[in-house]
Image: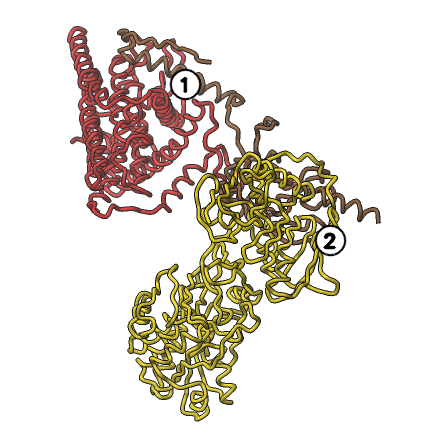
Chain colours: A red, B brown, C yellow
Amino acid sequence: MTLPIPDFILLNKGPLVFLGVSFLKVCVVFGAVMGFAALLTLAERKVSALMQDRVGPNRASVFGFALGGLFHPAADGLKLIFKEDFVPRWGDKFLFTLAPLLALFPVLLLFAALPFGNYIDIAGLRINLQIADFNLGVLFILAVSSLAIYGAFLSGWASRNNFALLGSLRAAAQMISYEVALGLTLVGVLMVYGTASLQDIAQAQGELLFGWLPAWGIVYQPFAFLLFLAAAQAENKRTPFDVVEGESEIIGYFLEYSSMRFASFMFSEFIEIIVISMLAATLFFGGWQVPYLQASGFVFPWGTEIPLNHYLVVLLQVGSISVKTVFFSWLLLVIRWTVPRFRFDQVMTLCWKGLLPLALLNILVTGVLIWWLA
Amino acid sequence: MIRIKKVDNRPLTLLERLYFTEVAAGMLVTLRHFFRNLFKPSNIVTVSYPEERLPLPGNARLRTRHRLKVRADGTPKCVACYMCQTACPAYCIDITAAEYNDGNPAEKYPRGFDIDLSRCVMCGMCVEACPEDAIAMDTGDIPGGALTREELMMDKRELLRNLPGEPSLLGASTRLHNEWDRKVKKK
Amino acid sequence: MKLKIDGKETEVKPGTSILGAAQAMGVLIPRYCYHPSLSVSGNCRMCLVEIEGAPKLVTACSTPCAEGMSVLTASEKARAARRDVLEFLLINHPLDCPICDQAGECGLQDYYMEHGLHKSRFPQTDKVRRHKRRDIGKHLVLDNERCILCTRCVRFCEEITKTDELCVRERGDHSYIDLKPGARLDNDYSLNIADLCPVGAFTSADFRFRQRVWFLQRTPSVCAGCATGCPLEVHHKDNVVYRLMPRPVEGFPPWLCDEGRMTYKSLRAPGRPAAAFCEEGNLKPAAGLRFAASRLGKLKPEQVAIFGSPFMSLEDNLALAELAAALGTKNFCLHFNTEPGIKDGILMNTDHSPNSRGLALIHAVYGGYTREQFSERLASGEVKFILGRNEEVKAALNAARTDIPSSVFSFSDEPAPGRACVLPAAGHFESDCLFINYAGRLRRARAAVKAPEGVLPVWQAADRIASMLGAPIRLETRAAVLERIKAKIPELADAPLADDTAEFYLK
């Protein structure tokens, strides 16, 4: 694996600087992701409430201030910590402990490959705004996210509960199936940009088509975006594809889990929403790109130029990816509270008979178009 | 009235089978609610119960928290006959009887009258059973949440709280008491 | 003598009243003034029946049966007559059932539901007003308004107690029950009048407003107030005894003396111990037993004395006798001097202990000292520790003019100063037990309420102490105790000890 240039420069300054800067980036991203995921648990309840003409949670208060329910994530966390930590007597205790970790950590690991900006020059260093720039970033994401299947499957197996086991069988079948469809929907994007590095894809989307249209993935691959959204929602096991656990009605793989073990399953689900949103933004909506924003400032197609400070540009770029992520997270919540649940056979039919052939067709058409245009 | 709603069970059209358009149509509905409630929260139907209350329909169909009625001179009309305790299907009433020592011909009064609202099923049998018209469920209070069980235990003092005395001719003991009261006041 | 009642043939002895003959057939004719233990008065007119061929209805209680008679107890005419009688009775009845203790066991309520169900034709305000809530004696409250003038109470005082305190004053519509001049209704059986009264005119001052009768559960038991051992019914609710009522049993008059009715009060007496009061302080009952056992274990057998009591049941005394035998001490007394007999011609006995005959049976089998010899043993100074019932240990020590450390079983609030250990014990309302009354009749008491937590009957406590001392007497269950009684006492070898209904007399 060759390191891209900014990190290469960093490495030349010595391994300590490289490690320090990387550690700082990990901390910032980890903090931002965990904070956002916590807010997302509240957002899910607030958004669903507004969609259903309700108020939503607004009771948890500190010193009499409820702030529209802002303390509910903290209250939920406190409650979950103090709940009984239950382990089934005949279950496999080691795997039972391992499963929630296996569900949570691969999802967190994904943020290593997701760029949240171009680069920043600070104290003589040029720092790439991405934790690790792989040139096979898309493959890395597909590979690591498929590790999360172990979490779902082991939890059902280790619980030694027939219902949990059936739930985890459904989860494994669904996740493996949609893994295939998800991978194939992304192939079109990779073909268009000719790279699998997410940073390179983001950078490539800064160019303009016909001199005025930002060359975002949605422009090249609108159909793949829809397929991606469906496959990713299914991969995340959320409504309408939540037949594997089905919160209140169906019994799922984390049936025997309580306390923070259960919380880590739920939390990984919310973090996955952020991953999907960020991935969708990066692949199809220009990532950290702001239309017409170059490294020096805005350059509009009609010739106007607004020079901007470097730090302002970085701020705009980070703000851009953040806004896009928030938007897609919200969109996923809205979808989750709009669409009713599929039956399990419908879930599998949609994958193998719907998404998969369509994704292949998309690849074929993309290939033909590239060949024809070349 | 029986209404008949015809369900259209035609097969789905191609556009509907594609699903994405239908999802979009569904999302239009939910998004309309979302944005309307976001910018105009007055449309939200939720009532934040303990702080906000809907006005109750004030008619005889309504059974709310109990109260004990009092006579014109402020003594409770209840004579501790235990009929409500006997009729109560939820075993939530607990009475302790005592005797008047001041010559009151009603003889008996409740020294303790406890209603456990956490057990009460609001059936109104106590009101039906009362031979002295002494208990009523017309306070307009709907017993609801409490943080401790003790808060849902109502004793005699709470049941008799802030109510005016009312002259009544119902009930033999009340009649006896009223005669005696007039006699005492004449002297 | 043969006659027909409601079309069914029956045969009775000459002189039987129609009411008695019908009752023998299971036909209950309503009545207020009639009571099987009192003379027939025939004034309430509730028991009117039709005799075929007779022009008028007759009172069933006062009309003797005649050969070939055909009685209709529920004919249209008889029912109409009863309804009218009831309506007359209710004209002046105050209808203060909510404050009346009789409600629930009231003749007026019962028969109104059965025969009346009419609307009142008289305004409430026109009712005749009389004295209410009259204090006429220690135990009773009289309400003249509720009275229907059946005169059961007057007849009871004339015929049973022969004290004659009550009379009917005035005439006709004005008549009412009153005390004779200068008298107060303070005889020893006055509370029976509250039972006799078919309405709420006489109510018990002790039970007044304490509980409603329909809540009460009933447990058959016997009175332990004296050697007569009258059968009674314990009325209790939620582990609290509220009153004792006579239980009708063949061969016993259906009365109870006032003293016997008050015996339940010791159960809830405020001074009654529910914990063991020991030299070490207050212990839980089980720890108190351990303390008593440890004191006993430090002494030689001949230094320990065990004291049976005629106030404790057969089981308790047997267990104490077995304990004495297991310890190997000769210092035990299962003897009681008594000359039982009915002292007032009704029920009350000269002997106040319920089980002197039972104690004598055990004394005959196990031996031991007589009371006089035991007193001498105590005075001799060899005895270092006594185990027995509180009151009797106190009396014995007073008689011997000594003070010896002792463990006493306490059933009541009787104070026990200066004892090494006071052990709470379950009384006869709290455990199943047996007595033998002065006439040699086996009396069985059923546990009506639960003893306070950890408090055991004496036989069980004795068994625990014996086990702790390493000399087990194997009386863990009541079945084992009954087996032991049958095995050891020849007089009771074939007695139906566990059967509640069978009667048994000593030979």
State the CA–CA distance, disc 1 to disc 2. 72 Å
Marks 1 and 2: same chain? Answer: yes
Asked if residue A315 is positioned above or below residue A350 in the image, the reply reads below
In percent of the image, x 67 and y 55: which residue is there?
C142
Horizontally, residue B73 falls left or right of residue B124, namely: right
Asked if residue A96 is positioned above or below residue C272 in the image, the reply reads above
Element carrying mark 1? helix
**Three-letter amino acid code at disc 1?**
Thr
- Residue C303 percent location from the top left of the image: 38, 88
**Three-letter amino acid code at disc 2?**
Gly
Could you tell me which chain the residue with mark 2 belongs to?
B
Q: Quadrant of residue A203?
A: top left
In the rendered image, is residue A320 in sight? no
Task: Give B116 or A229, whichever is nearer the viewer.
Answer: B116
In percent of the image, x 69 and y 48: which residue is there?
C145
- On residue B30, which mark appears? 1
Task: Give C268 or B7, whichever is nearer the viewer.
Answer: C268
Q: For the view shown, which residue lies furthest in the bottom direction?
A: C380
- Residue A368 percent location from the top left of the image: 16, 8
Label 2: few (<14), some (14–19) or many (≥20) C-alpha neighbours in 10 Å:
few
- Residue A208 percent location from the top left of the image: 30, 13
Could you tell me which chain the residue with mark 1 belongs to?
B
Horizontally, residue C318 falls left or right of residue B178, namely: left
Q: How many marks?
A: 2
Query: What residue does disc 2 label?
Result: B103
In the rendered image, is residue C481 in sight? yes
Horizontally, residue C217 falls left or right of residue A364, namely: right
Label 1: few (<14), some (14–19) or many (≥20) C-alpha neighbours in 10 Å:
many
